[in-house]
Image (cartoon, coloured by chain):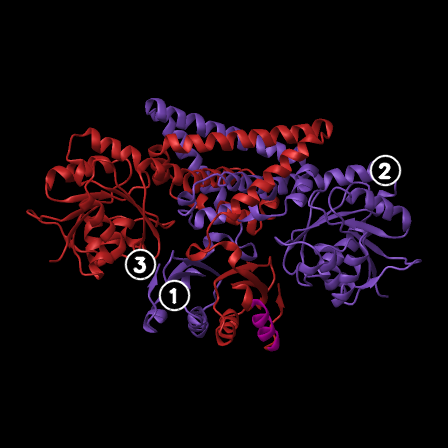
Chain colours: A purple, B red
């Protein structure tokens, strides 16, 4: 029997999910307050329009975070046989509101596909959005095993890697690995608004990396931060205290060249080294598992392709690639990450072929 | 007449500069407190060892920031005919100490090549390190035009793009675009040290970008921050106040769901959008000048090369490339940046060749 999934909300996530599930043979029906948005989603292959009398097995609420709990409760009441989930980036506040509503929460299990783009809306949707991404499934003491299984089944069907954890654990985790980094990036970027042009002109790759996510949608992120206010606040208080401690250390250096201040700075930088080393790399591998080989690449059509063809022909798997561009000059550096055992063979082969290699 | 450049300090920057200048036909002599380091630099082609009686035209002090001014003063005294520069990341404190020394400061002009790597030491040196990078030249009221010209000449010879600005302007600029972002990245990364493994496992590309420079050398960065304490402190005070304001806004949401708090969050996120938009992209172009085309790439040797070969064969210049990897699955997304006019032709050609393309 084909599973019938109702997708409520045809923005980026809802439409992408509709496309992915339809591709996998699910029956998908679509619903959105905007008739234009829902028709666009249908035309993109996300499913059929909802009709009176639909009886979905699973309802996925892909509404904005600030209305998600209301829509979940409505769905639990409208379809007494359906499992209901949502895809919002915060989980505890929604769960609390669902439990408080008196609706049958045994059929509700929250989820959070860790997939997104800097663009939003159905037009940005893609059926492979969840391919290989983490998808957190969030059961609670009152939810049924069937509900968890159904949601896990959907997530797995669209290629996501499921992680199961309770709501508070999810919210604390994303506060640290996603929401507070977003605030930090926005604050650093906001500080660039009033800089003279000559100063902004000195920006390098470091600043670009630190502030990339500062380009994210303010409306969506206001809701995400508000929805996870407590966990974000707790992590951010530590950040505030750390920043204040560095300001005090710098004050000490300005006023009296105080030697104690150096210890504060160096301990922070070392702590940053240690924290950074914990972040998993590609496919969850430790970042230390790869080494970089740097190759000078002329900035002309096909040059990078030639390089990568040579890497492939050498039988070496490229694990990651980062381009560094010069300023106003026609060369770049391609940094190729490979397993340590491949560094020497790769270097030798590329040099033989005339590439300028560094490591 | 061949210009004779003395490089004092054969770490990453000094050795790279020696190699680059030697390649351009300069006579380079090398000096370092460590006999091992200076011999390694010589063997890497950075120049010859210094000998008694050398009379350099230009002396480049590539010593650590905390000893740079002392070494500059020694060089001004040892070679009364030479122009002297240094390459430290902070400029005002060094200039102040040089002026206070009573040495002939008319022959001193500071500089700051905006080039570096996460690795350090002569072994990491490369002759193209300055290719296309900004190189700030920092004259002062007492310096001679000849000194500025000589330093500019060196920087240009090794391929750098020279920007001339006074010391305080340089220090304020790098505080905002480099030093404070370093502190922010280190603080966010430091917060990851105590997280449970399951939380770190949810880290995505956003966190990786925000914290990449948290892997930098703590010893070097302690000196850099201490050397620019005042300018960094001034920018960091604003960051501290912003973080504190966000904590207060989140407190308001936790305590009473206060609507006023949403305005604080949304204004910060919008300010982040505006600041981010000011950062120049590749070759100083505005980031908005390029659009992204996303292509699904199987994670197998040669696949990315095939894709880039197809891009090159379509006659389209790839402006930038970013790889997004899935978690535990054998596909990735290559995001190709091209000029807007190339988006449609590229998409059509790649789809014709069987690639899965999104934008």
Distance of label 3 from label 1 (alpha carbons): 11 Å
On screen, residue B20 above or below B181: below
Residue at mark 1: A297
- What numbered label is drawn on residue B14? none
Which residue occupies the foreground of this view, B209 or B300? Answer: B209
- The furthest residue to the left: B53
User: Badge 3: how crowded within 10 Å, few (<14), some, or many (20+)?
Assistant: many
- For image coordinates 71% across by 59% down, the residue present is A16
- For image coordinates 59% across by 77% down, the residue present is B353
Which element carries disc 2, helix, strand or loop?
A: loop
Mark 3 and mark 1, same subunit?
A: no
Q: Which residues are magenta?
A: B343-352
- What numbered label is drawn on residue A101? 2
- The furthest residue to the right: A53
Q: Is residue B349 magenta?
A: yes
Distance of label 1 from label 2 (alpha carbons): 60 Å
Which image quarter is the C terminus of chain B in? bottom right
**Residue B34 in sight from this viewpoint:** no
* Closer to the eye: label 2 or 3: 3
- Residue A148 at x, y = what percent? 78, 50
Which element carries disc 3, helix, strand or loop?
A: loop
Residue at mark 3: B128
On screen, residue A236 above or below A59: above
């Amino acid at each position: 029997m084909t599973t019938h999934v109702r997708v409520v909300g045809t923005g980026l996530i809802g439409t992408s999910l509709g496309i992915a599930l339809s591709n996998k043979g699910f029956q998908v029906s679509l619903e959105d307050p905007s008739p234009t948005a829902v028709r666009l989603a249908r035309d993109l292959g996300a499913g059929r329009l909802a009709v009176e009398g639909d009886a979905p097995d699973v309802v996925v609420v892909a509404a904005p975070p600030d209305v998600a709990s209301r829509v979940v409760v409505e769905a639990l009441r409208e379809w007494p046989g359906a499992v209901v989930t949502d895809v919002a980036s915060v989980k505890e506040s929604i769960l609390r509101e669902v439990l408080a509503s008196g609706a049958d929460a045994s059929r509700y299990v929250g989820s959070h596909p860790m997939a997104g783009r800097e663009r939003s809306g159905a037009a940005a949707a893609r059926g492979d959005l969840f391919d290989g991404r983490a998808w957190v499934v969030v059961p609670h003491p009152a939810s049924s095993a069937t509900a968890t299984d159904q949601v896990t089944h959907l997530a797995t069907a669209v290629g996501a890697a499921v992680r199961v954890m309770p709501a508070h654990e999810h919210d604390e985790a994303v506060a640290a690995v996603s929401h507070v980094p977003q605030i930090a990036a926005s604050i650093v970027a906001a500080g660039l608004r009033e800089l003279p042009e000559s100063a902004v002109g000195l920006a390098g790759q470091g600043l670009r990396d630190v502030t990339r996510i500062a380009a994210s949608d303010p409306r969506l992120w206001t809701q995400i931060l508000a929805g996870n206010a407590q966990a974000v606040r707790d992590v951010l208080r530590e950040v505030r205290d750390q920043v204040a401690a560095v300001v005090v250390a710098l004050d000490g250096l300005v006023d009296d060249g105080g030697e104690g201040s150096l210890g504060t700075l160096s301990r922070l930088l070392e702590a940053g080294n240690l924290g950074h080393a914990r972040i998993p790399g590609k496919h969850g591998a430790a970042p230390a598992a790869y080494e970089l080989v740097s190759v000078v690449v002329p900035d002309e059509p096909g040059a990078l392709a030639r390089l990568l063809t040579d890497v492939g022909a050498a039988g070496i798997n490229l694990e990651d690639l980062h381009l560094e561009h010069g300023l106003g000059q026609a060369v770049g550096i391609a940094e190729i990450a490979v397993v340590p055992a491949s560094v020497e063979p790769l270097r030798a082969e590329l040099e033989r072929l005339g590439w300028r290699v560094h490591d």
